[in-house]
Image (spheres, helix red, strand yellow):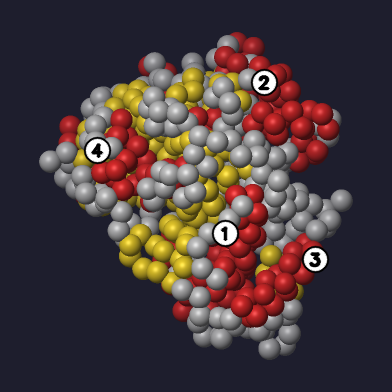
Amino acid sequence: MSYIGALDQGTSSTRFIIFDHAGNVISQSQKEHEQILPHSGWVEHDANEIWRNAQEVISSAMSSATLTGADLVAIGITNQRETTVAWDVTTGKPLHNAIVWQDTRTSEFMDDLQIDTQEHLKRLTGLTISPYFSASKMNWLMRNMPLVANAIANGSARFGTMDSWLVWNLTGGVSGGTHVTDVTNASRTMLMNLETLDWDQSLLDIFNIPRETLAAIKSSSEIHGYCHPSGPLGEAVPIAAVLGDQNAAMIGQVRFENGESKTTYGTGNFTLLNTGTDIIRSKNGLLTTVCFKLGDAPAQYALEGSVAVTGSAIQWLRDQLGIIANADETEKIAATVPDTGGVYFVPAFSGLMAPYWKNDARGIIVGLTRATTKAHIVRATLEAICYQTRDVLDAMATDAGHSLTEMRVDGGGTRNALMMQMQSDALGIEIVRPVISETTSLGAAYAAGLAVKYWSSTDEIRSLWQESMSWNPQNTQQMRTTGYATWKKAIERTLNWVE
């Protein structure tokens, strides 16, 4: 038998999963990496650590399944988007830690752009003015890191999102690695024109980015290069797909048609609505982005709502407050109380993303009384994830002109059945989880398999999707309305905190 591998490089960890032709998981391995927090609002990753972890999880998953590279027809790569790394192609070394998508150090730079420049950026890229995206991170590295500036002067500097860094290393690195990316990742840099699907010189000029430092842009599903035989697979296995993580999840959830959506619960929460080949400009705080491009087929676009802190709020309970030992405890602890006892938690640790886009917001916990316990705070954290998701879904319904009647969900957070019930209650619609909840990796595998004809069509892939569980609202409309109104009141308390 032959298999497909998926390398999923996320914000918190890197994993490698091997799938068979039916979409079943054969083997997997996962390893967390360090979250480096040099200053308030700064978030970095060690790109070398991520590359080491990628090699380790590939080797571990292959060993567990007693497979060799010859057993894989292809691999797909999916990655945390916007996170930016600069490296030197002559040494193979990163020139600085990768700057993570959550990082807000370039807020002032973005805010200081002239209004006409901001409008130009939004019109060409479909994105909002925010430090979230890659271009301002590249600009910061150029202005603040002499190693980066020197490497650019020498012609040896390369910029990329994490997919580019991994593909370059997997295809040989200093021995001749390939510098590529795909349209989904390129669309998150603020340097790609949504209509031409290419780097735009006017955008490069705004951020002073030399074109030669950037990767070639390819489709999401085609052969981007071949693994070097000296690498962890030991064979020239084709890398046949590259996608940003949320875009891969759309394919994993088989959301191929206009009007179909999904929400992923990870470090952050991300909702995408497929708008087909139409570029729909949001008027309600959402992003317009590339959904995916499968080979030579036209690109499909999406409306997206991005919430920065959801799963990472659970990590905060564990790592900073110490009131839980692991994420799986949250369901049991939250279930010991019938509600939050009036407590609301807005985890605006580095500002608010969609649909507010307020960099000056900071996190708050309100409604505390002497009766408040850690169970109330844990339940309020789960509720915050649900309300932030409703914020996005309400904006999406307004932009699209229709409300969703069902939401497909995936990601690690969907293992929490209590939170999924709370989400259904907050939205008033059915929530559906597939058998394979880690659909990001599955989507990368599907895209790679389509490129090498392992699967014949999207119709064949659609036939593989299976429902695991579903949740329907158990509360009243009045309860839903009252709870959400108080959430909005809590949101107001977070604003204008940072001068």
Q: Residue lying furthest front in this view?
A: 401
Q: Amino acid at mark 2?
A: Leu
Between discs 2 and 1, the one toward the N terminus: 2
Q: Which residue is mark 1?
A: 403
Cα–Cα gap, marks 2 and 1 = 38 Å
Q: Which residue is mark 4?
A: 455
Q: Which is closer to the viewer, label 1 or label 3? A: 1
Between discs 3 and 2, the one toward the N terminus: 2
Q: Amino acid at mark 4?
A: Trp
Label 1, residues with CA under 10 Å away: few <14, some 14-19, many ≥20: some
Q: Is residue 85 visible?
A: no
Between discs 2 and 4, the one toward the N terminus: 2
Q: Is residue 497 visible?
A: yes
Query: In the image, what residue occupies the spot 50% across and 55% down?
Result: 263
Q: Which residue is mark 2?
A: 204
Q: Which is closer to the viewer, label 4 or label 3? A: 4
x and y, in percent, of residue 101 in the image: 60, 42
Cα–Cα gap, marks 4 and 3 = 51 Å
Q: Which residue is mark 3?
A: 493
* Residue 29 sits above or below residue 485 on the image: above
Which element is circle 2 on? helix
Query: In the image, what residue occupies the spot 50% across and 30% down?
Result: 183
Which element is circle 1 on? loop
Query: In the image, what residue occupies the spot 69% across and 65% down?
Result: 346
